[in-house]
Image (spheres, rainbow, N blue to C red):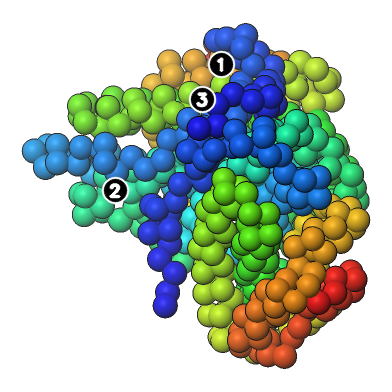
């Protein structure tokens, strides 16, 4: 079914949390390992605009519907960052713009060259490269949705769980856009399928791994996805990927978990 | 209910003072107060008793096109050190959202009149002569990223100055469009949009002033990049673009506005010698092809506007 971009834009609202009982955090604060994972997720949400940059240097930016999605998606993700920062704030953890800037500055030259790399690839490969970005985006959103749902289940704090499920529901709508775009573009071109398969096998890494320290990536992935239930979630993401044209048999997400020592 | 907690001041860090207030721009409060869809407040039924004339609708097409160009602007600035500044990217996220809905509001007015939200020029495929420029445009982020990352943080001043100037010109354009066809409903919509855009201007202007005042290199860089542009800059790079020449034509009969805008731009530190709007009007009133004179030289249309500096 086609993704209804107008409906997505019209129905979009920033994630709400004022009705949730965050006061409970005074009596029952979240444990440090959960706060550490939440901090990671919060930062990644705020850094969405950096991923947007990589998408905009491809020919994708010429499509009006795609631009509509980028505008609304980027804002929704910013508000996910705000919501998670609120939870962290109740625990005395300050997430401010200076700290986010410092993280972006730390990435250094790799980050400076990324748009060049993406632009060269996007223009040399042409419009077919957009499919790679779209499936990449879909996997990021599937991962984010799974991560929020897992954390909601693991922590069991009612207000936190509700917030995380609200965020996960928005991420699921983002999945719908990226997956629809990816499927359409992969179906239409063999070159798109070959390039996407190659790029995912060679370069895919968990969301946030480009900008966050590897120790943090390992902590979050282990916290959320180790054990049979966690790994079942990971395999579900790989199954989604495998159902895309030309991507059958890929187990990139499970491979990335194993490479980081996340055990079933 | 969540109530107050220790985080309250954290994301409300300010930039420099604005011309109207010394209170720093609160990006977080701006994000909280963002305005979404205007469709319920456009009063479209009022256009049934008095429809907008074609000239006004054409102007609204241009304004809609310009409001929709946010991803194009972000494409230019996010490949540079500007994207590192989380406060600026947070602002730009909400700015793009508000502009999206203003563009949507203009589209609704156009559609109500049976007009396409896009101008016919925008829908026409690019002529072969433009293909080279389009190719250049596709590869532009590569050069921009390499050059501007080497320049460093001073490039942010250029982007903020472009944002401020664009807001000044757009404010004047909205007012002019409303004035040309004194339709009460359109005037109210324009007033709403200008109010939203005033917040955008406050941010860009405060950032531009502070950054330009603080760095001689930023002033030199901004000065050297801006005079090459007639406005809007991205339309200059795309001659087939529907909005190239729009401001020039809109302001051609109002030299007072032209001079006023240029005076405003010249209040930015280091930009005292610019006459951008004058140049924009001049570019739009130039004949498409100059006429050879008997002496074999080319005659251009004399520019009817005078800078008051």
Let me know if residue A187 appears in the view. yes
Label 1 packing within 10 angstroms: few (<14), some (14-19), many (20+): some
Q: Quadrant of the C terminus of chain A?
A: bottom right
Answer whether residue B273 is visible to the viewer in this image.
no
Q: Earlier in the sequence, mark 3 or mark 1?
A: 3
Q: Is residue B194 above or below residue A203?
A: above
Q: Nearer the viewer, residue A173 or A124?
A: A173
Going from N to C along the chain, the mark reached first, 3 or 2, is 2
Residue B126: where, in percent of width, then height? Answer: 50, 64
Q: Quadrant of residue A188?
A: bottom right
Residue sitting nearer the eye, B99 or A167: A167
Residue holding disc 1: B264
Residue at 57 percent across and 9 percent down: it is B21
Tell which tag, 3 or 1, sits nearer the viewer: 3
Q: Is residue B210 above or below residue B46?
A: above
Quarter of the image that includes the N terminus of chain A: bottom left
Q: Residue at x 44, y 51 (%)?
A: A12
Return the x and y of residue B141 as percentages of the image width and height: 73, 54
Looking at the picture, tell me which residue is in the foreground, A236 or B266: A236
Which chain does tag 1 point to? Answer: B
Q: Is residue B184 rendered to the left or right of residue B241? A: left
Look at mark 2 in the image and give the residue it sits on: B108
* Quadrant housing residue B64: top left
B66 up-or-down from B180: above or below? below
**Residue B28: where, in percent of width, then height?**
60, 29
- Horizontal arrangement in the rendering, residue B191 relative to residue B309 (left or right): left
User: What residue sits 33% from the left and 48% below the top?
Assistant: B107
Mark 3 lies on residue: B199
Q: Tell me if label 3 and label 2 are in contact, CB under 8 Å.
A: no
Q: How busy is the neighbourhood of tag 2: few (under 14 within 10 Å), some, or many (20 plus)?
A: some
Q: In the orientation shown, which residue stands out farthest toward the front?
A: A27
């Amino acid at each position: 079914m086609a993704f209804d971009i107008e409906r997505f834009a019209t129905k979009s609202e920033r994630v709400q949390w004022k009705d949730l009982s965050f006061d409970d955090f005074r009596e029952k604060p979240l444990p440090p390992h959960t706060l550490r994972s939440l901090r990671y997720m919060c930062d990644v949400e705020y850094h969405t605009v950096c991923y947007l940059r990589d998408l905009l240097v491809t020919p994708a930016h010429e499509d009006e519907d795609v631009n509509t999605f980028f505008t609304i998606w980027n804002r929704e993700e910013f508000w996910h960052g705000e919501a998670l920062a609120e939870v962290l704030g109740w625990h005395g953890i300050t997430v401010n713009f200076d700290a986010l800037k410092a993280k972006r500055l730390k990435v250094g030259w790799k980050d400076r060259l990324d748009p060049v790399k993406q632009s060269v690839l996007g223009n040399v490969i042409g419009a077919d490269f957009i499919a790679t970005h779209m499936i990449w985006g879909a996997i990021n959103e599937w991962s984010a949705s799974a991560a929020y749902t897992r954390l909601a289940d693991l922590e069991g704090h009612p207000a936190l769980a509700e917030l995380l499920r609200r965020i996960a529901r928005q991420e699921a709508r983002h999945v719908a856009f990226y997956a629809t775009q990816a499927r359409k573009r992969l179906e239409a071109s063999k070159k798109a399928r070959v390039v996407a398969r190659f790029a995912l096998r060679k370069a895919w890494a968990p969301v946030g791994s480009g900008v966050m320290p590897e120790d943090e990536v390992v902590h979050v992935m282990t916290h959320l996805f180790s054990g049979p239930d966690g790994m079942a979630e990971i395999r579900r993401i790989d199954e989604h990927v495998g159902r895309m044209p030309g991507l059958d048999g890929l187990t990139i997400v499970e491979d990335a978990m194993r490479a980081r020592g996340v055990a079933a | 209910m969540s109530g107050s907690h220790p985080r309250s001041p954290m994301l409300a860090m300010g930039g420099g003072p604005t011309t109207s207030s010394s209170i720093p721009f609160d990006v977080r409060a701006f994000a909280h107060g963002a305005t979404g869809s205007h469709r319920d407040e456009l009063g479209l039924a009022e256009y049934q008793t008095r429809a907008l004339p074609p000239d006004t609708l054409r102007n609204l097409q241009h304004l809609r096109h310009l409001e929709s160009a946010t991803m194009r602007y972000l494409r230019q600035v996010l490949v540079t050190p500007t994207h590192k500044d989380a406060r600026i990217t947070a602002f730009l996220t909400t700015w793009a959202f508000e502009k999206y809905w203003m563009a949507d509001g203009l589209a609704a007015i156009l559609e109500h009149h049976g007009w396409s939200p896009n101008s016919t020029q925008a829908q026409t495929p690019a002529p072969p002569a433009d293909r080279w420029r389009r190719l250049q445009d596709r590869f532009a982020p590569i050069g921009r990223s390499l050059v501007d990352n080497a320049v460093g943080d001073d490039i942010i001043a250029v982007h903020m100055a472009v944002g401020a100037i664009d807001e000044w010109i757009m404010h004047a354009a909205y007012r002019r469009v409303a004035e040309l066809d004194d339709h009460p409903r359109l005037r109210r919509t324009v007033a709403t949009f200008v109010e939203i855009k005033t917040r955008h201007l406050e941010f860009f202007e405060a950032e531009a002033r502070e950054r330009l005042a603080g760095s001689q290199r930023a002033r030199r860089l901004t000065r050297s990049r801006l005079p090459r542009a007639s406005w809007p800059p991205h339309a200059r790079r795309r001659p087939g673009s529907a909005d190239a020449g729009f401001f020039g034509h809109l302001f051609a009969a109002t030299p007072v506005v032209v001079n006023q805008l240029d005076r405003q731009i010249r209040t930015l530190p280091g930009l005292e010698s610019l006459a951008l709007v004058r140049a924009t009007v001049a570019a739009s009133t130039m004949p498409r092809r100059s006429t050879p004179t008997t002496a074999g030289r080319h005659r251009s249309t004399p520019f009817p506007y005078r800078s008051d500096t």
